[in-house]
Image (cartoon, rainbow, N blue to C red):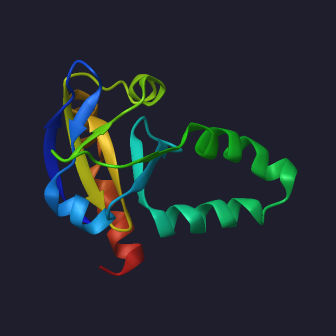
Amino acid sequence: MTGEFKSTLDSKGRMNVPIKLREEFGERFFISKTIGSRCIKVYKVEDWQALVSKIDDMPLVQAQPVRRHLIGSAYEVIPDKQGRISVPPTLREYAKLSLDVVVVGVGKYAEIWDKAEWTLENEQRDNETLAELATVLNI
């Protein structure tokens, strides 16, 4: 999944998922908190199931905080006929979602960001650090 798409939340917490991403995600997918950023991750069903399996394979003591954070915050969503999904209030609060949101495709998953938070994230990105990482990755 690639690309950056703008959307809006309506008064009921619904947002339109870009058609390109709906085609890639399929008829249903999962949304959940993420680790390390205040955004919502969007997973294909098979990728979500693989993540849950990986967490299930971890020792319980290590897995429990991750299980609570990711699995406990997850929702299966099915876009309506207009391509909208309902983002539950707990996830909207977690990601600080307001009216304007940005959906970013980042490979196997996508992220949903509040537009102001996404702008701040991009402004804080250190180009020197990115250049160092690119060198390590040989790209």
- Is 92 located above or below residue 28 in the figure? above
State the residue lying farthest toward the top: 11
Nearest the camera: 118 or 58?
58
Pick the front one: 35 or 136:
35
Image quadrant in which the C terminus is located? bottom left
Seen from this angle, which residue lies furthest bottom?
138
Q: Is residue 63 above or below residue 136?
A: above
The answer to which image quadrant residue 89 occupies is top left
Q: Going 22% across and 66% down the picture, which residue do you hit?
A: 23
Q: How many marks?
A: 0
Q: Residue at x 79, y 62 (%)?
A: 58
Residue 1 locus on image (x, y percent): 27, 66
**Taking 116 as reference, is 63 left or right?**
right
Q: Position of residue 24 (x, y in %)?
A: 27, 68
On the rendered structure, is 26 left or right of 61?
left
110, above or below 134, in the image = above
Q: Nearer the viewer, residue 47 or 136?
A: 47
Q: Position of residue 131 (x, y in %)?
A: 29, 64
Q: Is residue 128 visible?
A: yes
Q: Determine the residue located farthest toward the front in the rendered image.
A: 81
Q: Is residue 123 visible?
A: no
Q: Residue at x 49, y 67 (%)?
A: 47
At which x and y percent is residue 27? 33, 60
Residue drawn at point x = 69 percent, y = 39 percent: 68
Q: Is residue 16 above or below residue 49?
A: above
Corner quadrant of residue 87: top left
Q: Which residue is more in the foreground, 29 or 116?
A: 29
